[in-house]
């Protein structure tokens, strides 16, 4: 391989490369950095025997930034044909260059994985994951995003809807995806966390046979539901009593409390810690209940079978795994840990 200074005009992009979206603000920042400090890492190109000039193998962002900065020349490593291999190998090289960088969107990754599975003989999610240092779950979760409607894909690409929420939405039928999007567009969710829980609840509603409504119940079933409702409400009414007790405790003088609980402070602290842990779990369950209540209001009868999901988000750390094969979504405004790639350096030069 040889490093040369080439004319920017003689270089053109590879139309089949996995990157489709380029943040203009980030490109401006990179252009300013290159103007001041120069190009730290040459781009990679190969000779284009058909179109002439050179085709980018990796480094399109750096090439675009040169154009923005008005620079006419760029340092490039010229890869010989025998080094670059066939088009599929060059595509893999481009994926490898981009996959852990901040500007490659989850959907771009999904499309890249799908192409490899389609074009490479005997490729599997496991083989693709191994080749790029990812988990099989990461690959499957990305592939699940391909079930999103075009409207939702746009919001995922822009970052308005997070990856974990997108994975949950992708499991819904197109009709239910549109229902979620309409509710989201009205600002019904405080953040991605609420959207995750709502989409998960809607998925469960969607998968059920037509829910039993009150009008279809027998007198005995109506009476049983009434008893359950009253019992549940009485239990939750007691929570307010506990809240009042804890409120009094927060007003206590720690020094006087130490005297009053002489010999028991540690045990009482453990007691409150157990209560705090249970409050967290109860809050999670009620959040799910709220999502289910809202989901029942808009659930659309499935127009077709729900998409087959490539993978499941992990159950949250503060929740026991459910008996059902479908696990609850993680209770966090971020991707599941198993779905997260290596920490990304947003200031690095990105291909």
Image (cartoon, rainbow, N blue to C red):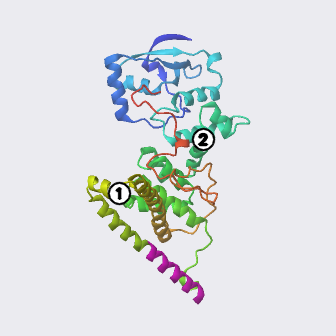
Q: Which residue is mark 1?
A: 261
Q: Is residue 175 visible?
A: no
The answer to if 209 sits in the magenta stretch is no
Residue 212 percent across, percent down from the top left = 58, 78
Residue 169 percent across, percent down from the top left = 52, 55
How many residues crowd mark 1 within 10 Å: few (<14), some (14–19), many (20+)?
few
Residue sitting at 74 percent across and 36 percent down?
122
Quadrant where the N terminus lies?
A: top right
Q: Is residue 155 above or below residue 178?
A: above
Under tag 2, what secondary structure? helix
Q: Decide which of 185, 339 is in the foreground and name it.
A: 339
Residue 250 percent across, percent down from the top left = 29, 58
- Residue mark closest to the camera, 2 vs 1: 1
Measure how far apart labels 2 and 1 are at the Cα level.
55 Å
User: Magenta region's main secondary structure?
Assistant: helix
Q: Which residue is mark 2?
A: 139
Corner quadrant of residue 52: top right
* Magenta region: 217-235
Residue 50 percent across, percent down from the top left = 59, 22
């Amino acid at each position: 391989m040889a490093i040369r200074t080439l004319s920017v005009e003689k270089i053109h992009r590879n139309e089949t490369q996995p990157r489709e979206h380029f943040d203009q603000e980030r490109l401006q920042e990179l252009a300013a950095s290159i103007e001041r400090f120069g190009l730290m890492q040459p781009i990679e190109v190969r000779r284009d025997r058909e179109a002439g000039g050179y085709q980018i193998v990796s480094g399109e962002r750096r090439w675009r930034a040169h154009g923005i900065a008005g620079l006419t020349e760029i340092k490039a490593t010229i890869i010989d044909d025998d080094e670059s291999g066939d088009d599929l190998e060059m595509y893999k090289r481009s994926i490898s260059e981009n996959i852990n960088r901040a500007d490659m969107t989850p959907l771009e990754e999904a499309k890249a994985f799908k192409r490899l599975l389609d074009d490479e003989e005997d490729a599997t999610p496991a083989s693709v994951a191994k080749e790029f240092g990812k988990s099989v779950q990461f690959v499957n979760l990305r592939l699940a995003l391909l079930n999103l409607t075009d409207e939702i894909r746009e919001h995922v690409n822009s970052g308005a809807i997070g990856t974990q929420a997108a994975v949950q939405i992708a499991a819904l039928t197109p009709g239910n995806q549109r229902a979620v999007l309409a509710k989201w567009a009205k600002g019904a969710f405080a953040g991605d966390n609420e959207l995750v829980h709502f989409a998960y609840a809607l998925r469960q509603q969607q998968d059920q046979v037509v829910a039993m409504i009150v009008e279809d119940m027998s007198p005995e079933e109506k009476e049983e539901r009434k008893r359950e409702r009253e019992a549940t409400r009485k239990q939750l009414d007691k929570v307010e009593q506990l809240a009042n007790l804890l409120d009094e405790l927060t007003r206590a003088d720690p020094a006087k409390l130490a005297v009053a609980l002489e010999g028991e402070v540690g045990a009482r602290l453990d007691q409150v810690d157990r209560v705090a842990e249970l409050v967290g779990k109860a809050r999670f369950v009620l959040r799910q209940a709220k999502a289910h209540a809202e989901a029942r209001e808009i659930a659309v009868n499935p127009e077709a079978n729900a998409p087959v999901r490539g993978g499941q988000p992990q159950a949250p750390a503060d929740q026991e795994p459910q008996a059902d094969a479908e696990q609850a979504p993680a209770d966090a405004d971020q991707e599941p840990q198993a779905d997260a790639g290596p920490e990304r350096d947003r200031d690095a030069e990105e291909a």
